[in-house]
C-alpha cells in the first residue's frame, strides 16, 4: 500500500506558525493600549478610529483559531510568548485605565457615532481582503512558490502599514496644523484593512 508524500509546510520567513499574525495582533492591540494610556491633553480624537475595531476582529479570530503543530521547523515558543504579551498587556492596560481613569474605557473604546455610517465599506474591505487571501491559497496551493512570495510580501507590507499608522496617529497627526481630510483617512484605513485581512486570509 503506497502512501502519498506531501511537501512540508513552509511558514513565512522560517518562523513558527502564528508568529507573523501574532506580531500583527500586537501592533493592532498596542494601538488601543497607547490610545487608552495617552492623557486627555494629547490632542487626539476622543475615540479610536472605526477601522481599528474591524482590525480587532482579526486579532480575536487569530487568537481563537491557533492550532498546535508538531512541525520540525521550529518551536512554538515564540508565538506563545506573543500571546502571553497580548493577554497580560491587554489586562494590564485595561485594568490600569479602569482604576486610574474609568471614564476613558467607555469614551475611548466606543466608536465615534459620526463614523458608523462607514461600517458597510469597512466590512466590505475586510471581507474582500480576507477572501482574496483565502482564494489565492486555495487556487495556488499552500506550498506554491509564487503564493509563498505573495504571502510573505503581503505580511511585510501589512506590518509596515500598521507601524506607520501608529506613528502617524500618535506622533505626527497631533502636530499637524491641518490634519488630513476624513475622506483621505478612510482611504488610508481601507488600505490597511485590505492588506492585513488579506494576510490573515492566506493563513487560514
Image (cartoon, grey):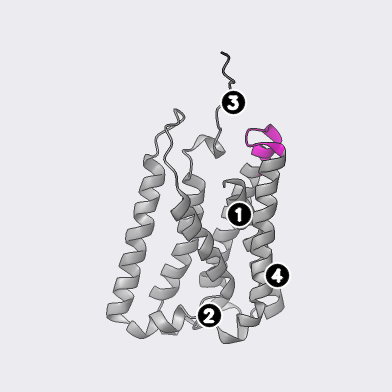
How far apart are labels 4 and 3 at the CA level?
Answer: 40 Å
Q: Position of residue 78 (x, y in %)?
A: 39, 43
Q: Secondary structure at mark 2?
A: loop
Depth-wise, is mark 1 or mark 3 nearer the camera?
3
Is the stretch drawn in magenta largely helix, strand or loop?
Answer: helix
Q: Tell me the number on the disc at residue 187.
A: 4
Q: Is residue 163 above or below residue 201?
A: below
How far apart are labels 1 and 3 at the CA level?
Answer: 27 Å
- Of the numbered discs 1 and 2, the one sitting upstream in the chain is 2
How far apart are labels 1 and 4 at the CA level?
Answer: 15 Å
- Of the numbered discs 1 and 3, the one sitting upstream in the chain is 3
Q: Is residue 145 magenta?
A: yes
Q: Position of residue 1 (x, y in %)?
A: 56, 13
What residue span does the magenta drawing correspond to? 140-150
- Of the numbered discs 1 and 4, the one sitting upstream in the chain is 1
Which residue has dot 1 on it?
A: 158
Crowd rating for badge 1 (residues with CA inside 10 Å; few <14, some 14–19, many 20+): many
Which residue has dot 3 on it?
A: 7
How far apart are labels 2 and 4 at the CA level?
Answer: 18 Å
User: Is residue 156 visible to the viewer in this orientation of the structure?
Assistant: no
Q: Tell me the number on the disc at residue 111.
A: 2
- Of the numbered discs 2 and 3, the one sitting upstream in the chain is 3
Do callouts 1 and 2 mark residues in contact (Cβ within 8 Å)?
no
Amino acid at each position: 500500500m503506497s502512501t502519498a508524500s506531501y511537501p512540508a509546510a513552509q511558514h513565512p520567513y522560517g518562523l513558527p506558525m502564528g508568529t507573523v499574525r501574532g506580531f500583527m495582533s500586537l501592533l493592532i492591540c498596542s494601538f488601543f493600549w497607547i490610545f487608552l494610556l495617552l492623557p486627555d491633553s494629547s490632542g487626539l480624537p476622543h475615540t479610536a478610529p472605526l477601522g481599528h475595531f474591524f482590525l480587532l476582529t482579526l486579532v480575536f479570530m487569530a487568537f481563537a483559531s491557533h492550532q498546535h503543530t508538531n512541525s520540525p521547523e521550529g518551536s512554538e515558543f515564540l508565538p506563545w510568548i506573543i500571546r502571553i504579551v497580548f493577554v497580560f498587556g491587554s489586562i494590564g492596560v485595561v485594568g490600569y485605565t479602569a482604576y486610574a481613569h474609568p471614564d476613558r474605557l467607555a469614551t475611548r473604546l466606543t466608536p465615534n457615532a459620526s463614523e458608523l455610517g462607514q461600517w458597510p465599506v469597512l466590512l466590505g474591505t475586510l471581507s474582500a481582503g480576507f477572501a482574496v487571501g483565502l482564494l489565492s491559497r486555495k487556487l495556488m496551493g499552500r506550498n506554491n512558490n509564487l503564493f509563498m512570495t505573495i504571502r510573505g510580501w503581503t505580511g511585510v507590507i501589512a506590518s509596515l502599514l500598521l507601524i506607520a499608522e501608529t506613528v502617524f496617529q500618535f506622533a505626527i497627526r497631533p502636530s499637524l496644523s491641518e490634519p488630513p481630510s476624513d475622506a483621505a483617512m478612510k482611504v488610508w484605513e481601507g488600505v490597511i484593512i485590505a492588506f492585513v485581512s488579506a494576510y490573515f486570509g492566506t493563513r487560514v
